[in-house]
Amino acid sequence: MAVAKKKIIVVGCGPGAESYITPAAKAAVRKADVLIVSRRLMEYFPEVAAERIDSGVDIEGTLDTIAARRDAGRQVVLLATGDPGIASLAQPVIRRFGRENCEVIPGISSIQVAFAKLGLDWQDARIISAHSSDPEESADDLRPAGKIAVLGGREGSLRWAAGMIPKLGKGRRVFLCEELTLPDERFSEVSADELIRIPVSARAIILIIRGELLK
Ligand SMILES: C[S@@+](CC[C@H](N)C(=O)[O-])C[C@H]1O[C@@H](n2cnc3c(N)ncnc32)[C@H](O)[C@@H]1O
């Protein structure tokens, strides 16, 4: 008899603190036979006795592992930090297995928390990722944006931002948001020059905001 394959569930786990994990996310994780997790999320949900598989850096390998577990009828749940809609494995998973075979549970993004700290809305923000490599966006491309949020967390990402900010024109204010929602949370206004000297945390967002938007 053919094994019934379950939908793969992609769960947003928020930026760090347990209080930012939604009840819907917790309920989805409780269904897991297999949890696909990055190292950072490995210790989450200790009460769930599912098999834990490190999502690592080999995306194709991870997708093959998900396929094998799913073919065996097991409930696969993929954990994403923040919201799965921003720089997560959700899209590769959906492309491989199809929208109809996946369910996404949204989470609270680190970007949302960063803008909430400033008391700014963010529907018009440019979100760019310097998480694993320097972004391809040029200064010409970014200059029109009043609000830019850079996913950092890598020393090179601060260097990239420090080089980009002067090219965007005068009047930009820069905020470094680290370890949001966690006990070591840090949020400060910095200059582009300072960015080069700061030892960055693995969890960091750089907000680059046109000054008049903060009046
Ligand atoms: C792979 S991306 C995932 C983003 C995630 N999907 C989200 O919505 O927050 C990882 C990046 O998210 C940011 N990040 C995640 N958690 C954070 C936190 N607690 N504080 C600051 N930045 C965080 C950092 O820029 C990190 O390099």
Image: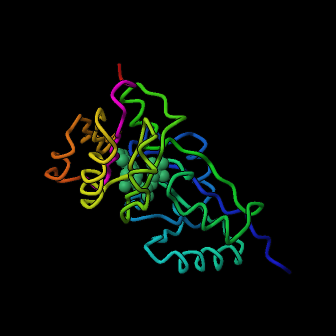
Image coordinates for residue 82, horizontal then vertical, percent: 47, 48
- The magenta stretch spans which residues? 201-213
Quadrant where the N terminus sits is: bottom right
Q: In which quarter of the image is residue 19?
A: top left
Quadrant where the C terminus sits is: top left
Above or below — where is 174 with respect to 38?
above
What number of labels is visible? 0
Of residues 206 and 177, the one drawn nearer to the viewer in this rendering: 206
Is 202 within the magenta? yes
In the displayed orientation, state which residue is furthest to the top: 215
Above or below — where is 133 with respect to 150?
below
Q: In which quarter of the image is residue 50?
A: bottom right
Image coordinates for residue 124, horizontal then vertical, percent: 53, 36
Seen in the image, is 20 located left or right of residue 214? right
Of residues 84 and 207, the one drawn nearer to the viewer in this rendering: 207
Is 87 within the magenta? no
Q: Which colour scheme is used?
A: rainbow
| Residue shown at the point (36%, 30%) measured from the top left | 117
| Residue shown at the point (30%, 41%) measured from the top left | 177
| Residue shown at the point (30%, 51%) measured from the top left | 164
In the displayed orientation, state which residue is furthest to the left: 197
Query: Is residue 151 at least partly visible in the picture?
Result: yes
Query: Is residue 45 at least partly visible in the picture?
Result: no
| Residue shown at the point (53%, 80%) measured from the top left | 61
Image coordinates for residue 196, horizontal then vertical, percent: 17, 53
Image coordinates for residue 165, horizontal then vertical, percent: 29, 46
